[in-house]
Amino acid sequence: MIDLCRSLYTHRELVGVLVAKQIKLRYRGSVLGFLWTLLNPLVLMLVYTLVFSVYFRLDMDNYAAFLFAGLLPWIWFSSALQQGVTCILDGAGLVTRSRFPAEVLPVVTVTANTVNFLLTLPLLFLFLFAFRVKLGMPVVVLPLLVVLQYLFTLGLVLMASALNVYFRDLQHLILHLLTVLQFLTPIFYPLSLIPESFRPWAFVNPLTVLISAFQDVLYYNRFPPWSPLFGLLLFTVVLLSVATTMFTRYKQTFAEAL
């Protein structure tokens, strides 16, 4: 893990260049360009609001604001994982060069998606203001949640991208897993709707811990419970240790497998 961190620090300028390039390429040739970063979550929010608050009659004050507070971090996570699992395959032309640091690619993918998420935050704050959702002291926790989700996502992407070089069905499995997780995670419904007997099991899902924490801070204006977050932090440290070890071991034969 230390060697990987040292390598990333050495190649930090390369990471910055590739992150900027990935963000530019995403919307190159598009008329609206960067505006799609804002429009995509807005369209999803409108559709889900219609389905859950109108069709399913989910009774919540400012449901659209609640949904938006959980939907944005979910989009960040799912986009980073979907793109990250194939980042080594997609960057095969770079990875097969003898001196290119392959560990840069997962970091670039997660960082680029994090930048997109951060750029949508002003829109979220405007949206909350329009719905008269108050933000108080709990908002100071927001940077900690962003860092925790970044590290958790990076650990998964490091592991998945390395494994996918050798087991390419993984990228398809992850797409299906994300679909299941999207509905098992309380994005569209409040945690209170989960029966109490099942609620502890809901927190086995790391995304439940993260998404509900974002909703606590941004919608309910309260501090999230600390014990699940601390548990997730410990899990993330272990995940990163295992993921970096696995990535370092597998990257030695990336060029042959690609």
Image (cartoon, rainbow, N blue to C red):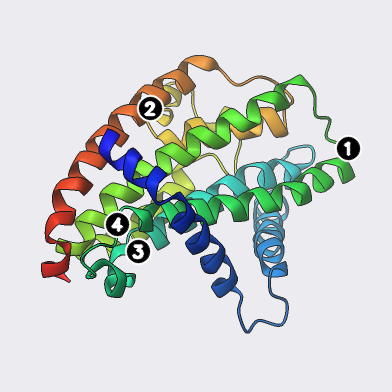
The residue at which mark 3 appears reads as 87
Q: Determine whether, in the image, residue 97 is placed left or right of residue 80.
A: left
- Residue 172 image position (x, y, % from top left): 29, 65
Q: How many marks?
A: 4
The residue at which mark 1 appears reads as 132
Q: Quadrant of residue 238?
A: top left
The residue at which mark 4 appears reads as 101
Above or below, comparing residue 213 to residue 68 in the picture: above
Above or below, comparing residue 99 to residue 191 in the picture: below
Question: Label 4 sits on what residue type?
Answer: Pro
For mark 4, give the secondary structure. Answer: loop
User: CB atoms at circles 1 and 2 under 8 Å apart?
Assistant: no
Residue, x 29% and y 42% (percent of image)? 4
Q: Residues within 10 Å of mark 3 (few under 14, many from 20)?
A: many
Q: Residues within 10 Å of mark 1 (few under 14, many from 20)?
A: few
The residue at which mark 2 appears reads as 201
**Mark whose residue sits in front, 4 or 1:** 4
